[in-house]
Amino acid sequence: MSAKILLLDFTADGQPCAELRAILAPSFELLTETVAAAPTPSIMDELAARVSALKPDVIFVALAGELLRHPGEIFGAFTREAAPAPCIVVSEEGGPGETFELLQHGAVDFVTAPLREADVLPRVWRLLKQTRRAEALPRALGEKLGLRNIIGESPTFLAETRKIPLVAKCDACVLIYGETGTGKEVYARAIHYLSPREHKPFIPVNCGAIPLELVENELFGHERGAFTGAGMTRPGLLREAEGGTLFLDEIDCLPPLAQVKLLRFIQEKEYRPLGSTKTCRADVRIIGAANVNFEEAVRTGKLRKDLYYRLSVIKLALPPLRERREDIPLLARHFLKKYSAEFGKPLPVIPHESLAALISYDWPGNVRELEHVIECAFVFSEQSATLSFDIHPPGQNAEARPETFQQAKNKTITQFEREYIQKLLLAHGGNITRAAHTARKNRRAFWELIRKHRIDVSLFK
């Protein structure tokens, strides 16, 4: 495929663009624009005009230092008009905060040094093959397979959901944290089906359900005769997911050796099946998930530190249902419609008392538990649209005494404090000092509130 690649160099030493030239020159026509001076608005407007005239198919933008942390100065000139081509940012640094900043300002992907052919070339080929679909991503959010199940309006929930279109259009690894039943696989599917990989396989794997001695065989496959009973060659899940996405749930349950091999695959896109002397390659995006704190898993040795850092380019934290109680009526009505159609029964009504019981329950099993409660109620409901649909959460008596005014007030205050603190930490990238300043509280008092509500600050960094 003939294509024109433009390298925009905003670095002092030009090293990233030199590495890119070595990788791209054999396959593409390369153009280079170097900006030595500070990128003032006038300089950027002139550059944007030159870039538009060159008509590149893909643009690599090499950034460093302050420009990496304030990409609006670079991309502002391009966004004043239609972007001339999809832009991939190249840098020697950059954490999750910078990642989202870059994606929000118009970059479609990013890659960090050291640059490898296996990281760069697949990104270019995918961009060349796909149409300009970035504008359609938000609209498609409610239309693609699995995404209609992402339901909610609470601030903490929406903060994570709005990241999906941005995360989907890049090709970085993703880690998703959330308690059991919060919808980690639904989010992973959303990322896959909104990405350029949507027509390729999405392979979900529960690492905790695979016996330890079989994990490597499941992931990487084996050759005939690799071990006793291996009568035929078997491709692993990496081969099955070629071109698509491999979702590794409970990734902290992988044994150490499998983690080492997975790390090498993520870095080099290479792996070796059991009993094979040949190295295989695969183009697969990895999304990991766990219901335990990732930093704690690293500290206790369940998750290798180097694997964690390689996977955590982008992190999503899904709030438990008890922290977004305002979404319970929406979810309940969604499941009512689902099972009304599935069981062929009239759509029932949830009485006010039952809805209040659902909202007040803590839902340790989260959205999955709520769905199971409603499904069970449907099974035992009468075949009549005139009867109300009486739902009471597990362990809660239908005749339970209502809360006192003070109990209800304390619960509301607790919920408000927790959500308010989480919202501030999210807005300030986990910086406690800046969050406390916004709340107009001293840092010590703000920290005590964080401890009171057992909020893990690391999830917001």
Image: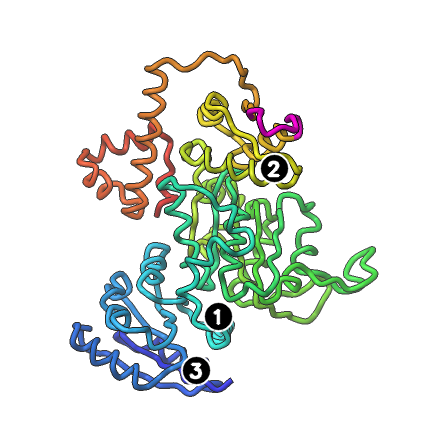
Look at the picture and state if 384 lies above or below 17.
above
Distance, label 2 to label 3, CA atoms, is 60 Å
Q: Which residues are magenta?
A: 379-388
- The disc, 1 or 3, on the residue closer to the chain's N-terminal end is 3
Main secondary structure found in the magenta portion? loop
Q: Is residue 123 magenta?
A: no
- Judge whether 17 appears above or below 402 on screen: below
Give the mark, 2 or 3, whose residue is nearer the N terminus. Answer: 3
- Asked whether residue 386 is drawn in magenta, I would say yes
At x 37%, y 41%, the residue is 156
Q: Secondary structure at mark 2?
A: helix
Looking at the image, which is closer to me, 85 or 296? 85
Identify the mark at residue 119; answer none if there is no mark.
1
Q: Are marks 1 and 3 in contact (CB under 8 Å)?
A: no
- Pair 1/2: label in front: 2
Quadrant in which residue 374 is drawn: top right
Q: Tag count in the figure?
A: 3
Tell me which amino acid carries mark 1. Asp
Q: In terms of secondary structure, where does tag 3 sit?
A: helix
Foreground disc of the pair 2, 3:
2
Residue 137 position in % (x across, y down):
43, 61
Give amino acid for label 2.
Ser
Residues 299 and 331: in front is 331
The crowding category of the residue bearing disc 2, from other C-alpha atoms within 10 Å (few below 14, some 14 to 19, many at least 20), is: some
Q: CA distance from mark 1 to mark 2?
A: 47 Å
* Amino acid found under the numbered disc labelled 3: Ala
Res 340 label: 2
Residue 395 is left or right of residue 326, and the answer is: right
Which residue is drawn at the image coordinates 62% and 47% (left, top)?
Answer: 206
Would you place residue 136 above or below residue 366 in this image? Answer: below
Q: Are discs 2 and 3 less than 8 Å apart at CB? A: no
* Alpha-carbon span between mark 1 and mark 3: 14 Å
